[in-house]
Amino acid sequence: MKKIIIALLSLMSASAFADIYANNGFYLGGGVAQIKASKISKDWNVVELMGGYKHNSFVGGELRLGAAGQSDPNITAYSSAYYRVESANNVGKTYLLAGYTYGSMSGTTDDGNFSGFSYGAGVGVVIFDTLNLNLEYRILCKDNKHNIDLKGIGLGVDYRF
């Protein structure tokens, strides 16, 4: 965990000189993530779809939908809404996410819904002017009611319009 945070912070310095004219506007993407639960000794491979709007060079909003495959226990589906702060140039980007996640889980003693604060950090590499490859670490959900923390690492792509 500490190594991931150190790597993310060191890569953040690479985009310290941000291009204030970075791509603004809408973006769509998708990715995969491996999510671990604090209460359950289970890992899930999750598929995510995301879309967002970058209001200006540094601030935007993002929505995500995700689900795991068939397993028991299982994260059947979740949705997240994030406030996204980003620093980007023509080589890479770093970003922070803060928001809220709501989802459902089956096959555990606490069948039902989970919800809570969600946050994370990521780095991206520009492949083309409008296509990015992203690596991120997120706390998907901190649900105090069910005493469960879902966290993981993800890899994704996004296309900027």
Image (tube, grey):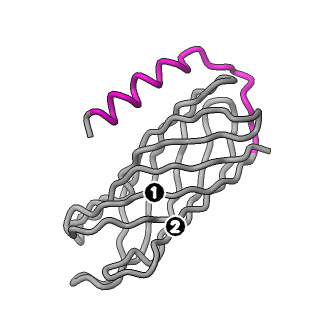
Label 2: state its secondary structure.
Answer: strand
Residue 38 lies left or right of residue 30; in this view the side is left
- Residue at left 68%, top 19%? 19
Residue 134 placement (x, y as % from top left): 55, 42
Seen as rendered, the residue at the extreme right is 161
**Label 2, on which residue?**
66
N-terminal label among 1 and 2:
1
Residue 97 placement (x, y as % from top left): 48, 44
- Residue at left 37%, top 78%? 74
**Label 1, on which residue?**
33
Report the front residue among 152 and 79. 152
For discs 1 and 2, the disc positioned in front in the rendered view: 1
- Residue at left 25%, top 82%? 108
Label 1: state its secondary structure.
Answer: strand
Residue 150 placement (x, y as % from top left): 32, 60
Reply above or below: 117 against 13.
Answer: below
Residue type for callout 2: Gly
Task: Give the number of callouts.
Answer: 2
Image quadrant assignment for residue 65: bottom right
CA gap between label 1 and label 2 equals 9 Å
- Residue at left 27%, top 69%? 42
Residue 134 among magenta residues: no
Q: Are the two marked residues, 1 and 2, in contact with CB atoms closer than 8 angstroms?
A: yes
Q: Which mark is residue 158?
A: none
Image quadrant assignment for residue 76: bottom left
Reply above or below: 134 against 50.
Answer: above
Residue 18 among magenta residues: yes
Name the image quarter holding the C terminus: top right
Which range of residues does the magenta coloring cover? 3-25
Residue 76 lies left or right of residue 72; in this view the side is right
Residue type for callout 1: Ala
Residue 51 lies left or right of residue 8; in this view the side is right
